[in-house]
Amino acid sequence: MSAVKKQAVFCMFFLSISFVSVGQQTLFFSWDEFPGRWCVGLTLGPDFYYGDLNKTKAGISRNVSIAGGAFVSWQMNNIIGLRGEWLIGGLTGILVRDPEPYNNFHGVFSDFTVNATFDFTNIILKYNPFRKVHVYGLGGVGIMTWSSASNVGGQNVSGLNAAAVLPFGFGAFYTFGNRLNIGLEWTTRVVMSDKLDQWTASAKFDYNSYLSFWISLNFNQLKDMFQKQEK
């Protein structure tokens, strides 16, 4: 089983537990008493390319670039949420480094995704509206556009492409005073194309992973604070 399939199976396992738990633990399900219904945030961190021009197929890779973006999320209840995210970053891959970096590519990408999030902490543990630390999983769909150029065996190929992208992953965050959240997240983003590196070979799909450090602000908490001040 390939590395990306193992990651997908891992995430699907926990998401399936989430759906079962939601059905069995309705007493832990709260629609009103939880921190943060609407929030906006920013992300920044390294992104890693995996494909035909990279020997590493999962995890931390030497083919690393920087990415960043912004997101808006809506927490439907204490377990399930929706998040729209825009991300932009670099792409780089070097298959052979010695005696010189040939068989390589570089480029930039941008994607927009819509993801469902599942709070594992509120599923496994009894719901606590004052909990500060949360662990979650996510999965979704979106579209990626990219511009890249490769040099393989002295042949230069470049192009501008677009394809569907399927992100999935997991993360954790800490809430400060029910208004500010700081988190760490790992996502694998499977691109429904083998042209991320402009080189078609054995892999059916190319993909990249994103290790993001993010910060967000809960809007409904500010609204509640202003309403209390008016009273």
Image (spheres, helix red, strand yellow):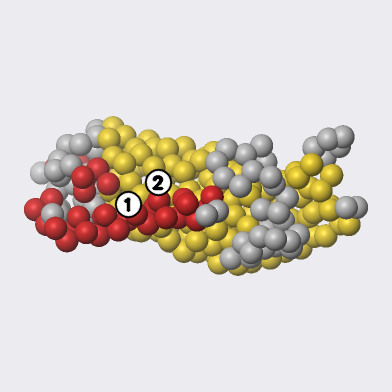
Amino acid found under the numbered disc labelled 2: Phe
Labels 2 and 1 touching (C-beta < 8 A): yes
Q: Is residue 152 above or below residue 64?
A: below
- Where in the figure is residue 133, as x and y percent of width and height? 27, 35
Whether residue 57 appears in this view of the structure is: yes
Identify the disc placed on residue 110. none
Task: Name which residue lies at 42% across and 55% down.
Answer: 9
Amino acid found under the numbered disc labelled 1: Phe
Q: For mark 2, does the 10 Å Cα neighbourhood hold few (<14), some (14 to 19), or many (20 or more) residues? A: many
Query: Disc 2 designates what residue?
Result: 170
Task: Name which residue lies at 14% across and 58% down.
Answer: 24
Disc 1 is placed on an element classified as helix
- Where in the figure is residue 92, as x and y percent of width and height? 70, 46
Task: Name which residue lies at 84% across and 52% down.
Answer: 151
Query: Disc 1 designates what residue?
Result: 14
Task: Name which residue lies at 33% across and 46% down.
Answer: 136
Residue at mark 2 to residue at mark 1: CA–CA distance:
10 Å
Q: Quadrant of residue 150?
A: bottom right
Report whether 125 appears left or right of 110.
left
Report whether 160 appears left or right of 187.
right
Q: Which of pointers 2 and 1 indicates the residue nearer the eye?
A: 1
Pick whichever of labels 2 and 1 is earlier in the sequence. Answer: 1
Q: For mark 1, does the 10 Å Cα neighbourhood hold few (<14), some (14 to 19), or many (20 or more) residues? A: some
Q: Quadrant of residue 116?
A: bottom left
